[in-house]
Structure formats: C-alpha cells, structure tokens
Image (tube, rainbow, N blue to C red):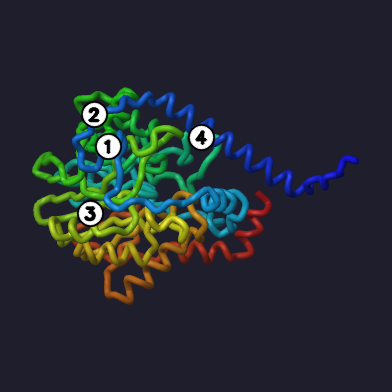
Amino acid sequence: MHRRTRPFSPGFQWVRRVLLLSGALLVTACLLSAAKTNLPVAGYANSPQAADGRFRNPAPKPADGLAKTLGILWNVLLNKPKTTVPTAPIPVDTLTRAELEAAPDRSLFRLGHSTMLIKLRGDFWITDPVFAERASPVQWMGPKRFHAPPIALADLPPLRGVLLSHDHYDHLDRDTVLALAKTTDVFLTPLGVGDRLIAWGVDASKVRQFDWWEGTTIDGIQFTATPAQHFSGRGVFDGNKTLWASWVIVDGDTRLFFSGDTGYFDGFKEIGRRFGPFDVTMIETGAYDAQWPYVHMQPEHTVQAHEDLRGRWLMPVHNGTFDLAMHSWHEPFERVLALSEARGIPLATPRMGERLDLSAPRVATRWWRDVEAANASPAVIAVGEQG
C-alpha cells in the first residue's frame, strides 16, 4: 500500500513560492550586478584589516547559523509590519543650485538616508550619494524611497569631492557615481571601493583609496578614514573584498564625524581620543534589529558612540528614506530623542533638504511627528485607499 501524503495547504504553497521566487530574484540580481562590476581584486594583503584575501573586523562576527538566517529572511518577507513605511508624505525642503551656491560655508543639507551635502571653503562634498529610486542592484525590486531627493542629481553644483563609506547599495549607487564623475574632482574611498569605481569607468586619477587611520588634506581640509564594524559586498561571491570605514573631517576649528554603517565597538573611543571632540557627529540610527547587533547599532549604541567620540551635537542618519528593517520608520527618531534628552545631548534632526549650520546647529522641529499625525488622519487614509 502506498501511504497517502497530506497535500500542502494553499497558504503554505503560496508562502513557499514567494520565498523561492524572492530568493531566486535576489540571487540573480546580485549575480548580474557582480558580473557588471567586474571588480579587479587589488593586492591589499599588507593591510592590517586583510586576511586570506578578504577584509575583516578586529572583533570576529558571531556565527549566525542557518536557522537564524532563514528566520530573518522569513520575517523580512512575510512578517513586515505596515508601519515600516510612512503613509503620509515625508516633508522635503526643495533645493535649487542657486540656493546651494549662495549658502554660507559650513552648511550641511541632508538629502536622504546617509547622503549629506556639505559646503566647506566654497566647495561641496557629498557622503554616500544615492539618488536611485531603490536601494537595490536592480530598479524593479528592492527598498523604494519614501521621498524624492531635495534636488535632482543633474541640478547639483560641481562637487569638489565624494566620500564613500562602503559599497552596499544604500550607500553606493552606480548610476549616481557615474553621473557625478563628470563634474566631481575627487573620490575618497576605503580600500577596494575605489577599484569598483575605476572598473565602472571613473577616471583613476580622481580616485584615492585609504586604509583605516589613513587620509589626505585637500584645500586645507583634513579627511581621515577611520574604523567601523561592518561588512561589504554587492554580489554573491564578493563578500568583504572591499573595506568599510567611517570618516573624520577637520576644517580648521570645525570637526565632523560620519559613521557610515557600523555596529557599536571600542573603536569609537579611540577615534574620539585621536580626533575629538567633534562639533557634529553624523551617526547611523536606523535599519537596526536585535538579531543583527554586530553590524548595526540600536539607538542606545548611537548615543553611547556619540559620547565615546566626545561629540557635541548628534545628528542621527541612515533613516527616513528606505525601508531596511522591521522597526517602524519613525521609531529611530523617537528612541534617539528620548535617550539624548535623558543624557543632555543636543540633537539635530533637520528635514530632508533643510540647511544645518555646522558652526551653530539648532534643535529642529520634530517633523516625523507631523507625518505620523497625518498618517492617523482619516482623510489621509481615505486618499491612500483610493490610490
């Protein structure tokens, strides 16, 4: 006798198809992206961060295991709460090239996620520029922007330089980089990331690559690549082939810190000892989860890192633009606000496109609360349902 097997329920079959299709699409997209990149693996064996052909963090990453990895994927694909995406518009202060050119020195404009446009000594510098609709190897799937950039890519004034922290898609957008390369003087990157740019067609004479604690001085402004605890890769097989970093910017008596992506680690204290105190620290506060504490920080870690760095004003970044985690889109702002207030830390939370005076920052409006109030409005919900 043949034993009859119980058929999978329609719901289970649908879930299985979604998982298989999503996984296949993601792998295909990453493979295509890696093939398009054609990354020449440079010889960085002498770097203290390199071992066995890949870069690594000083503290080994705890093993996740297959069960944990599958559990994270299951939650991301099937258990996402609706609150990870705002249902009302994010406020954006539209910028023009004329306004930027007229802005005083030491102005900062947040363009979204980890993209900051900074004016120093009459020239513009930009961090991790991403103007793409999606933070993804392809533009037909992946995390979609909550808001348009405050200024179109083509309307940006010529840039003195681009600072890149690592090569993940929400920090390094190929099309954006290639567009900027036409009017940008220099690209400052961690080791290996510059090789990607050159492989994409960026003039090698514009690219400068640095290990941790290395840097350069341009027009009297000091740029130093400093440690971070993260990882890298844009395809399936190129994991940790490029280095990741945070950045220290020193312009006379003004000191800035840009974290890129990082988990909390002892390096913040050493950076603070060598370069602090900082006037403004731009530190990731978003896209975190209790299941991946090693490579991203909870808001408590953000505030502690700011104190380790001996920072004055804290500006939380890596939030408000892409849906990259399981928490509510506005949760990072509320948590870091409560923590900073409890510790007496001034918090700068400018709207997208709003000018921040780096010489004299001020407390901005809590704009995300207005968005949430609109989210709860029956009129807004009705409009959303009709659309």
Q: Residue furthest bottom?
A: 342
Q: Are marks 2 and 3 in contact (CB under 8 Å)?
A: no
* Front tag of 4 and 1: 4
The vertical placement of 308 against 175, above or below, is below
**Which of pointers 4 and 2 lies earlier in the amino acid sequence?**
2
- Under circle 4, the secondary element is loop
Quadrant of residue 385 within the rendered picture: bottom right
Q: Which residue is labeled 2 in the image?
A: 43
What's the distance in space between the residues labelled 2 and 1, CA to CA? 35 Å
Q: Mark 4 and mark 2: span between their CA atoms?
A: 32 Å
Query: Which circle, 2 or 3, is nearer the viewer?
Result: 2
- Identify residue type, mark 4: Gln
Nearer mark to the viewer, of 4 and 2: 2
Q: Say what amino acid the circle numbered 3 marks.
A: Phe
Which residue bears the numbered disc 3?
Answer: 257
**Label pair 4/1, CB-CB below 8 angstroms:** no
Residue located 63% across and 54% down the image: 384
User: Which residue in the structure is indicated by mark 1?
Assistant: 157
Q: Is residue 351 visible?
A: no
User: From the viewer's perspective, is the residue at label 2 or at label 1 nearer?
Assistant: 2
In the image, what residue occupies the spot 12% across and 39% down? 218
Foreground: disc 3 or disc 1: 3
Crowd band around label 2 with a 10 angstrom C-alpha radius: few (<14), some (14–19), many (20+): few
> Visible in this render: residue 294?
yes
Q: Nearer the viewer, residue 269 or 103?
A: 269
